[in-house]
Amino acid sequence: MPCAKAIYRALLLCYPAAFRHEYGDQMLLMFAEQMGEARRRDGRFEQAALWLHAAFDALTIAPKEHGHVILQDLRYALRTMAAHSGFAAVAILSLALGIGANTAIFSLWNGVLRSPLPAVYKPEQLVILSNPDESGMWSGTWNGLRNFLTYSEFEQLRDHADSFSSVMAAQSSLTNWQVRFDSGEWEEARGRLVSGGFFQALGVGPAIGRTFTSADDTATPIAVISYDYWQRRFGGSPAVLGKAFTLRKTIFTIIGVAPHGFIGETSGQQPDVWLPLRMQPNVFPGRDWLHDAPPAKTMWLHVFGRLKPGVSPAQAEAQSNAIFKAGLESFYGAGASGERRHELLDQRLKIHPGAGGASATRHDFSTSLNALLAAVAVLLLIACANLANLLMARGAVRRPEMALRLSLGASRGRLIRQLVTESLALAAIGGLAGLGAAYFLHGALVRMMAESDPRFQMSFALDPEVLAFAVATTLAAALLFGVLPAWQVTNTDAGASLKEQSRGARGSHAQIRWGRFLVCLQLALSLPLLVGAGLLARTLYNLQRADLGFPAEHLLLVRIDTREAGYDTARRDNLLRDLLGEFKQIPGVRAASFSHLGLFSGGESGLGIEVEGYTAKGANDRDSALDLVGPSYFATLGVPIVLGREILESDDAAGPKVSVINEAFAQRFFAGRNPIGMRITSSNNDRRTTYQIVGVAKNARTQTLRGNIEPRFFVPAEQPPLHENNPTFLIRTTPGTASVRTAVRRSIQQVDAALPILSARSIEEQIAPLLAQDRTTAQFAVVFGCVALTLAAVGLYGVLSYGIARRTGEIAVRIALGAHPRRVIAMILGETMGLVAAGLALGAGLAYAASIPIGSRLYGVAPQDPLTLALATGLLLLVALIAAYLPAHRASRLDPMIALRQE
Amino acid sequence: MPDPKPESPLPVAVFHILIALADRDRHGYSIMQDVAARTEGRVQLSAGTLYSSIRRMLEQGLIEELAESPDPSSTDERRRYYRLTRFGRRAAVAEVARLNSLLQQARATGLVPGA
């Protein structure tokens, strides 16, 4: 029998403590009696049934009883919340902000940096043979690791690499096309060219119709559209199949719709339409990206492979490189020999994991997103510390209630459970509100990211990972701010506390100590946020005012597409001359020129060079950036010529070949020598052109805002050493570019109505996207910094007010004994400053550690910039002083008589 | 304080307990035995079901616990006795009326033979 009782007692442990406490003995008694009777009757079956019942109760009744207790606590928690609605509102609001910000940034962070490609079959089997972080195109020769592949390289891999079950290629950049359905208006559609095996390699079937197959690696004008575009543009009508649209001069037929959620191979982009790679000449007329003539290659494709089971990435990489190398050998043939051949063949492929797909944004945004995620985590910690403090201060008021309940027999565990349930309920409401906040924050974040990459798109999805994160954050927050106060508030000797209550004093020394610790922690955590905000804000300020080397206003940049319009070299030179003439006639235009690279276009061009009198130090010391420019380029931009002359109209195709170099070029290749009259020989593949240097221009930033200014040489556009790009006109205006912009468009139309204008922007508009990420990060950091500052102030104010309220008696006695109010204030501030100093010292250490990872995003300010640290510390100190002064001032005005009587 | 409305229909275990307490105050084991006897062993309240129901009925005010044993001869002080409250009696009567009306409806349709 004792054994059976022990087992039954163990089963009783399944019930809530309160229930066990109340009825456990009765149940045990009843069970023993039932068992005794069964034994007397010698009913083995009956005994077994009793055990079964007991076990069944533990499994069904016990959880119900737990549910009852939780419900009771919850009801109590909601009542408490309603009774202290001010506190509840503050708590819920700060939690909603904290959890919302964390969820929004986590969702973006997860989506950009970690998520696999949506709707793709087993994405972990995918690998990328090109560089997933890059997008664009490179034509010419290459050295080292390849960013993109050419069409024929893709074909060789597709046909010979048997490490892969399938290989596909996709245009690395997303294009905005003008398309027209039937005889409607031209409208914009985003899309990219893909190989026939694209959908099959990604393991994706159609929603309706069919997708491309490897049989579609032909020049057939067909198209697959995205599910989103189908819904948006066609209302999801199945009649979309067979519908035709015009793009350039080709009519494409829609053959299928990709499945829901599928965005293709690049994360953060949502194409509307996919076209076969082989249609490239129709889609980008005037260019052939499918065939290469030695030694120049057109590299523009991302190539993905799906690994066969059992093949390791290393094996696949070795095989791909073998095929790639063999292709290079046969491409360059025996034409080049010796060192040149060795240089040409020095190219490799590297296999990258392909589950996350390619992404132009991932790499760029990773530092910012990591920093933002860390910042919002710290913000939530600060908010939790603040709430813990408020709860503790409120808990002091509830101590008598707790003491009463303890003296009436409630267990401490029960009270802690109830207080934590209150915190959980607060956090749950905060978390729910946080999800709403996250939705809006996410939208704002994506919009800001799209400022720096207009093709970036990502919708807020409450996927399991984001939801799990939100729930985990909410729970963690509840425990962080709930457990310590619950422990503190119930840590009370019932009798003593009840007696204390009657004397009017509230709270304990331990509570004050914990409160001070929490405030110290808050201050310490706030400082790195403020310092980070300061550093990023100064970076933005510096970038916006970066000295470009020329006036960055009243400058219009207009890019036209001469290739599409079918101009050959000679006709084009005439066209550009005519257009410059036209532009100069426009009222408000002070000067005009053009450049093939344009300003801050994101492109770059460079060539191998030999410089007269300079011995190259190795293979990497034989090239330079260059630009092909029109007459008066430097005068138009406003870049001073420090030596010699600039490019003139007389520097045409027939004239002697001349070049202007920048100071960086002069420094690198002519250290100490006079460069005027010296020669530069450029080599583009096997075409060599020699230029005589006629001038040196001051250094100017024309492509990047960060980093060193690269050595660059400028040659007249009519004396090109390489294939020309589409030109960008630089038009210097008197104030007011708007009217000039319209007039420039009209002039172009007049000269050639078929000439496409690719863009027409002011220099400010051109630079803005380069600053967008810095602006976004800085804005967020400043907002977070302000929130942290406010929370720290509230925390400090709360703790001091509470501490002073506890010391009313002592302060009243001091005043009664003649202490001057100013001395009372000084005393309290003096005590507070110790706490603040400790927090700030700890914070300075944290700020130092936090500044290291954001170093790469800073510009014109050192990560450990003393001024920023001093300013942030000063600001925090000032806010702390104000937060401390208010309760101190109140204390100094105590009427000792009233205060002591209350005591 | 106005009496809250009783649940309707009453859970089976609750109704049995109300009936068991209708004629006299009982302790838990006695309630269990009474229910078993009246139903000829078909309803066997387990300790868990019984005390979970008692907890709920005490909260709802259907029953109350007696401060001391009503049976002076009882030597076992561990036993806790329960008594039907006025509200509990009303709830039981309401439940009987509900069942009665249900029975009459069943008879009216000829589902069961009438009395």
Image: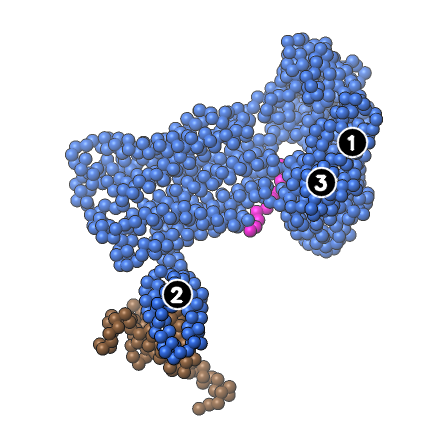
Q: Chain of mark 3?
A: A
Q: Which residues are magenta?
A: A452-464
Is A844 drawn above or below residue A94 in the view shown?
Answer: above
Q: Please name the residue that numbered disc 1 is placed on.
A: A328
Closer to the camera in the image, A130 or A777: A130
Labels 3 and 2 within one chain: yes
Q: Please name the residue that numbered disc 3 is placed on.
A: A316
Type of secondary structure dominating the magenta stretch: loop
Q: CA distance from mark 3 to mark 2?
A: 62 Å
Is A375 drawn above or below residue A860 in the view shown?
Answer: below
Q: Tell me what residue is drawn at x 67 percent, y 14 percent.
A: A669
Amino acid type at circle 3 is Ala
User: Tag 2's secondary structure?
Assistant: helix
Q: Chain of mark 1?
A: A
Q: Tell me what residue is drawn at x 75 percent, y 30 percent.
A: A139
In the image, the chain rendered in brown is B
Other residues around mark 2 within 10 Å, as few (<14) / some (14–19) / many (≥20): few
Closer to the camera in the image, A524 or A548: A524
Q: Quadrant of the C terminus of chain A?
A: top left
Amino acid type at circle 2 is Ile
Is B71 drawn above or below residue A628 in the view shown?
Answer: below
Closer to the camera in the image, B106 or A411: A411
Labels 3 and 2: the sequence-earlier one: 2
Q: CA distance from mark 3 to mark 1?
A: 18 Å
Colouring scheme, one of rainbow, by chain, secondary structure, one colour: by chain
